[in-house]
Image (cartoon, rainbow, N blue to C red):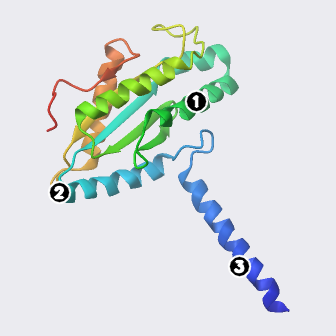
Amino acid sequence: AAGDHRVPHTAYRRQRQRGIRDRAFIDALTGLPNRRQFDQALQAEWQRGVRSGQPLALLLMDIDFFKQYNDLYGHPEGDACLQAVAKVLPSGLNRSYDLIARYGGEEFVCLLPECSLEGARAKAQALCAAVRALQRPHAGSQVAAHVTISIGVAAVVPSADARPEQLLAQADAHLYAAKQAGRNQVHAGNHEKVS
């Protein structure tokens, strides 16, 4: 009789541990993978790229004037805005191994294995359009009447003597450039070729 109780208990404990592990990799607000899961995926895809010689692209995205959105509409509405953007972003991707994660605050990140700079730029433009299509009012924005995003794009063929953080830094620099150029746009740097 004791064995009968142990089996469900063990199954329950395993399920509970799996739930805890899943929560450790999922952003509670948006349901997207979190920064921790992204960091692991970036390392893994970088190593895969080193072996395959295929490019790895990264998109770093920021909701434009999000602080003003929160100030104007309040934090609950700010959370709802993050959830709406998080829901629409994956629809812009058509490959199961592309990863969109919440990077922190109003930032999202997208990892695109085996994707050139050209391909990544096209996906980024599709994501910008998907967020614009939400038509979510944003009276505090200085670029549009609705919520928009800015995206920095970077792509590189991973090599053993480089680090994945360099790809992230490049995407971050391009995101900054997109903001400096007026937001609500994609910036992929001045190099057309994957270096």
Q: Residue 179 versus residue 48: which sits nearer the camera?
A: 48
Of callouts 2 and 3, which one flags the residue occurring earlier in the amino acid sequence?
A: 3
Q: Which mark is residue 82?
A: 1
Q: Position of residue 72 (x, y in %)?
A: 63, 13
What separation in Å lies between label 2 and label 3 (alpha carbons)?
A: 43 Å
Q: Which mark is residue 160?
A: 2
Q: Mark 3 belongs to which amino acid?
A: Thr
Q: Residue 124 versus residue 76: which sits nearer the camera?
A: 124
> Above or below — where is 191 with respect to 22?
above
* Left or right of 190 in this view: 6: right
Mark 3 falls on what kind of element? Answer: helix
Q: Mark 1 belongs to which amino acid?
A: Leu
Of callouts 2 and 1, which one flags the residue occurring earlier in the amino acid sequence?
A: 1
Q: How packed is label 3: few (under 14 Cα within 10 Å), some, or many (20 or more)?
A: few
- The number of numbered discs placed on residues in the rendered structure image is 3
Of callouts 1 and 3, which one flags the residue occurring earlier in the amino acid sequence?
A: 3
Q: Residue 19 versus residue 96: which sits nearer the camera?
A: 96
Which residue sits at x=70%, y=75%?
A: 11
Q: Tell me the quadrant of the picture where the N terminus can be found.
A: bottom right
Q: Is residue 12 visible?
A: yes
* Left or right of 28 in this view: 172: left
Q: Which mark is residue 138?
A: none
Q: Which residue is mark 3?
A: 10
Which residue sits at x=51%, y=30%?
A: 106
